[in-house]
Amino acid sequence: MKDISIIVAIASNYAIGKDNDLLWHISNDLQRFKRITEGHFIIMGKKTYYSLPRRPLPKRTNMVITDVANEQIDDCLMAYSIEDAVNKMDINNENFVIGGGSIYKQFMPIANKLYITRVHKDYEADTFFPEISLTEWKLSEKIDVDDDKQNDFKYSFEIYERV
C-alpha cells in the first residue's frame, strides 16, 4: 500500500484559493511545506503546477495529473488519472498531494495523513478543501501560531491521521 498524504493550507471556512492563487502568504507555512516535501513525490493537477512560482519545484519528483492523453510537461512525471498517479507513486516513501481542489477531493478517501495549516479566518474563494470528518480522521499534532508578525491572523499547523 502506498503512503499517501495531503498537504494544504485552509481557511476556517475551508477556502484554499481564488483565481488559481493562494489567499495568503505565510513564510512559516512555505518553509514547513518545503521541509516536509523535499526528497518526496509531490502530486498535483495541471492548474496547480502552472500556479507554482518555480516549476518544477526543486528537490522533489513533480507528478502532474492531466486528462489530456500523452500530454508531457518538461521535467515532470505525468499521470493520466488518479489510479495512474497512485500506480506511479513512490512505494518506499511518503507521497504528497499538493492540490488543487478537485485533486484533493479525489485523494481524500485514499490518503492516510493530512498536513493542515489552518488559517483562523474566513476567506472569499472559488476553491475549497473537502470537510475533514472527525469520524474518519484523528488530530495527532497541533501547533498554534499566534505571534507571526507578518500576518494579522492566527494559524495552526495540524496533522491528522486516518482512524
Image: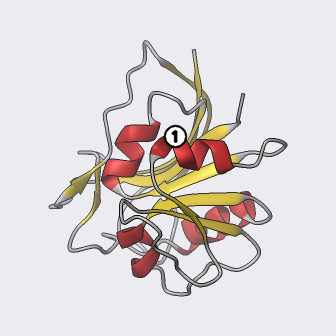
Identify which residue is drawn at 22% across, 68% down. 18
Taking 50 as reference, is 111 left or right? right
Label 1 secondary element: helix
Identify which residue is drawn at 56% across, 57% down. 43
Taking 60 as reference, is 7 left or right? left
Kind of residue indicated by mark 1: Glu
Quarter of the picture containing the N terminus is top right
One can see residue 119 in this view = no
Identify which residue is drawn at 18% across, 61% down. 125
Most extreme residue toward the front is 70
One can see residue 57 in this view = yes
On screen, residue 111 above or below 79: above
Identify which residue is drawn at 53% across, 80% down. 73
Residue 75 locus on image (x, y percent): 65, 81
Closest to the observer, 94 or 125: 94
Closest to the observer, 96 or 115: 96
Counting every numbered tag in the picture gives: 1
On screen, residue 7 above or below 50: above
Residue 78 locus on image (x, y percent): 56, 65
Residue 123 locus on image (x, y percent): 20, 59
Residue designated by label 1: 83
On screen, residue 145 above or below 147: above
